[in-house]
Amino acid sequence: LQSTMTKRRRPMPVTATVILSLFSTPHLGSSERIETSRLRFLALGDWGGQAEFPYYTEEQWMTAQGMARVAAASVEFDEENGSQYHRPAASFVVSLGDNFYWNGFEEDVDEEMRYHETFEKVYHHDELQLPWFIIGGNHDYCGDITKQLKFSQDPTTRWVYPDFNHRIVREFSINRHVPPVKLEIIMIDTIQMAGNICFPPESAFSTEYFKPPPGPASDELSLELAATTLDWIKGALEESDADYLLVAGHYPIYSACTHGGTPELVRTLDPLLKQYGVTAYISGHEHCQFHFAHENVNYFLSGTGHDCCYGSEMKEFLPKGGELKYLLADSYAYSGSSGVRGGFISFDVTRDEMVVAIHQENGDILYESALLPREEHFKRIKNSNTVEVE
């Protein structure tokens, strides 16, 4: 344990340049109006390959095949109504962080090569040539996270990472004469809020490694950045009039798996989700999958983009009064007892409900849950400064 302690690296204090890169008001990173009766997308966490050749894992490659299968358009049968319906192709992918293992883009890393080998080469399928909306994870922050933002500057890329925090808005209806359904996803940087400690690969899976994030560093700029990020999130939540409102971050608020929940997010972020009637919070970080419901908010976790699974050591520490609806974990970290090697989540949004499905690596569904639209009293009237959807 002592050797682990001496090898860990605390993050450098945040620079003023990073502070100034944030928007003081919610930044609408992507908006679109679509003519369809349903909208589909995928979410994937902790998919970032490995630092050695071939720069991806077998489990990551398998999970990519399953994602392509689920992302494809198809004709489905509705058993309840006894009729067929068209299931459209997925519209985009939400990436939940830890995009490049082991420590992001460190100084000696060829980021262009890693981008190609870990991302473009693995997710090469036609069905996955979609916008990928990105946030950073703790491993990404152990390197130069700004290099990942720069990939968005290429106008031909599907890598969408306009800032550390950004928003996705999609409105859809069968035609323009029908009032649209509105989906909003607020993509947040939880490392800015909850801090991080970097470990070398040889110290992975130690007791220290699995401790929760320490909170923001104590220097003035790091504390200012954490406060700025929280204010940004509150502003975005206040402004939203979405029928379905999701918040996506890397760190989980609650978790039954080996890392456990994130105390800093329980203290600062969770009350906001409840106050503004957020439909669900989705996260990665833990290499397991689960659905937990607590005080009218749903928490989905899927950090199995490149392997599975951690154990369920922290299950007993979930808050009382909540309901653990689903948990995929091994008996202990990577014991193989679950029989699952990777996975992701899909979302199928209609006017009446949003069906969230947890998939294993080949695309088979392990669990499904239907969530209802937000209650009207949570929605906010747009102010004159809001960017209108095209």
Image: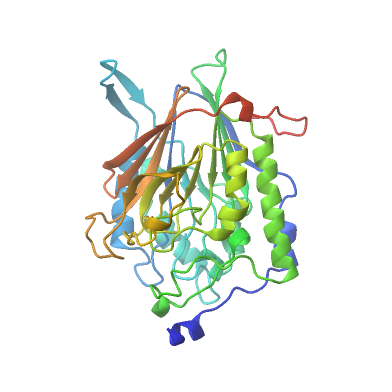
Image location (x, y in percent) of residue 52: 38, 72
Q: In which quarter of the image is the N terminus?
A: bottom left
In this rendering, would 124 be left or right of 388? left
Q: Is residue 268 above or below residue 71?
A: below
Residue sitting at the far right: 384
Residue in front for this viewpoint, 55 or 167: 167
Task: Tally the marks.
Answer: 0
Using residue 374 as the reference point, say whether residue 220 is left or right of it. right
Q: Could you tell me if residue 281 is visible in this image? A: yes
Colouring scheme applied when the structure was drawn: rainbow
Foreground residue, 243 or 101? 243
Quadrant of res 293: top left
Q: Residue at x 41, y 59 (%)?
A: 286
Q: In which quarter of the image is residue 127?
A: top left
Residue at figure coordinates x 58%, y 64% from the top left:
145
Residue at far front of view: 320
Of residues 345 and 205, the one nearer the viewer is: 205
Residue 390 in view: no
Question: How far from the left and from the top, in percent, is residue 120?
Answer: 42, 55
The answer to which quarter of the image holds residue 59 is: bottom left
Q: Is residue 200 above or below residue 267?
A: below
Q: Where is residue 231 in the image (x, y as percent from the top left)?
A: 71, 49
- Residue at position x 23%, y 61% from top? 336
Quarter holding the C terminus is: top right
Left or right: 92 in relation to 63: right
Residue 354 coordinates in the image, percent (x, y): 44, 31
Tell me which residue sits at (29%, 21%) in the image: 78
